[in-house]
Image (cartoon, rainbow, N blue to C red):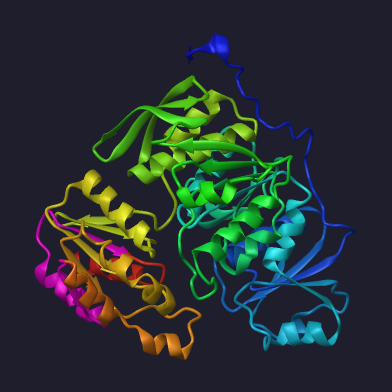
Amino acid sequence: MSLINSEKKKKPQPIDYGKVTHFSVGQKNSYHFVGIGGCGMSALAQLLKQQGHQVTGSDQQSSDVIDRLQNLGIDVTIGHQAENLDTQLDVLVLSAAVKPENPEWMQAHQRQIKIVKYAQLLGELSKEIPTFAVAGTHGKSTTSGWLTYTLQRAGCEPGFVVGADVGQLGCASSAGQGQHLIVEACEYDRSFLNLHPSCAGILNIEQDHMDYYRDLDDICDAFGAFIDQLGREGVCVANKSDANLMRTLSGKPTRVDTYSLREQADWSAGQLEMIDGYAHFNLMHSGYDLGKVACKLPGWHNASNALAVAAMAHHAGLVEDQIIDGLNHFTGVHRRLTLKGRLNDVTILDDYAHHPTEIQVTLDAIQAAYQPKRLWCIFQPHQHSRTRFLLDDFATSFRQADRIILPEIYFVRDSEKECREINAEALAEKIRENGGHCDFLSDFQQILDMLQRELCPGDIVVTMGAGDIWKIADELIYRLR
């Protein structure tokens, strides 16, 4: 390791959390999880089971996650019904998707059983163990998965709740055996304010979830309250290149550790270059060169995510060799530029991007890494309210795509009024006004028929969105075979 101006600098030290090998939530209780098959719910169920609590659950359908829970000795019932609640039940845990008319919720209310939401319970657990929360409008799943992988590769065995499956971890959540809990912290419904993290990584702040938030200032206020949860003892790993975040941090007493690809920051990328779409750089920390990083994830945005991972891994106690090793070997999370297949010299990708900024950086990364003859983007807008509020931004975010196809907007949470005010045809027209070659085809079969007719060798197809657009990628592979 080389030193730069080392005579003037004292190497910063990570937070000392002491010996923490387990955590508990009060006395031993009996918990029932409604919607236990969800990513976060299943992880919390495992954590409580590991602590010796009695844990049961229910869900609408079976899955690999349900099988795993049952193998751990957690009794899971398929279907929601009042009879699922044990006579000695202490606490009912609800996923965000459960409605008040759910029979198990109604039964617990009638019996005056304590009822908590997933986010509330996760918040209680975060009081008991050093918790690393990854927040921001974009990049949370990749960054929290990358941090988990880095710690796991270093032998730390953290508990984790990531918003997407991580192939190298074998799942999206786990109880773990170590002294850390890593969580993806969602700002929707201000649910991340339930958390009490020791370290929070904030990647960016932009307008989103406008069905819930009033405006950008309202979003920044929520992130400010999240930062306040750290107090004076915690640390905020912050993207110095994000103006909204820096404004939100202004005047906060919390200790801040910054990172940036462009600004002078505590963590930076020296000798940064893009080779075939993948970032190569020297990881720099307060003037120290910690080693060479060659990202296996494409795009400038993932180079920035790597710096966030490095800073948080440092505060978890990892040394430079362990950090570099994790950065150099992570291959990504499910539905983040996932290669689905190559057939007849046509490459098919799938991605979760559903916000204009995510679309733009993802298409940039595809162009740099794959250099396609033509880039087809099959984008499924997600939420009528998001599409309406960010219509102009969406219209300019597809400039790297040669062909764009839109199905109808994927319905999530919106009111009937929102559904009447915007549709995918209006977005397609806006994209065309901005120079994009865009077709609106409401039916998936129509989209597949067009692709089958018009695709040529050298083309790349990316299905993109947070709904069920991935089905087109799977069916297209079947047809091309």
Q: Magenta stretch: residue 457 in it?
A: yes
Q: Please indicate, yes or no, whether residue 160 appears anywhere in the rendered image.
A: yes
Q: Disc count in the image?
A: 0
Q: Which quadrant holds residue 147?
A: top right
The residue positioned farthest toward the front in the image shown: 251
186 shown above or below 244:
below
Q: Which quadrant holds residue 468?
A: bottom left
Q: Is residue 3 rendered to the left or right of residue 398? A: right
The C terminus - image quarter: bottom left
55 shown above or below 275:
below
2 shown above or below 145:
above
464 shown above or below 384:
above
Q: What residue do we see at 39% from left, 39% from top?
A: 303
Q: What residue do we see at 20% from left, 60% from top?
A: 401
Q: Please indicate, yes or no, whether residue 166 appears anywhere in the rendered image.
A: no
| Residue 405: image location, x then y, percent | 22, 72
Q: Is residue 387 rendered to the left or right of residue 23? A: left
Q: What residue do we see at 53% from left, 37% from top?
A: 258
| Residue 200: image location, x then y, percent | 62, 46
| Residue 185: image location, x then y, percent | 59, 56
| Residue 385: image location, x then y, percent | 43, 77
Magenta part of the chain: 435-463
Q: Magenta stretch: residue 169 in it?
A: no
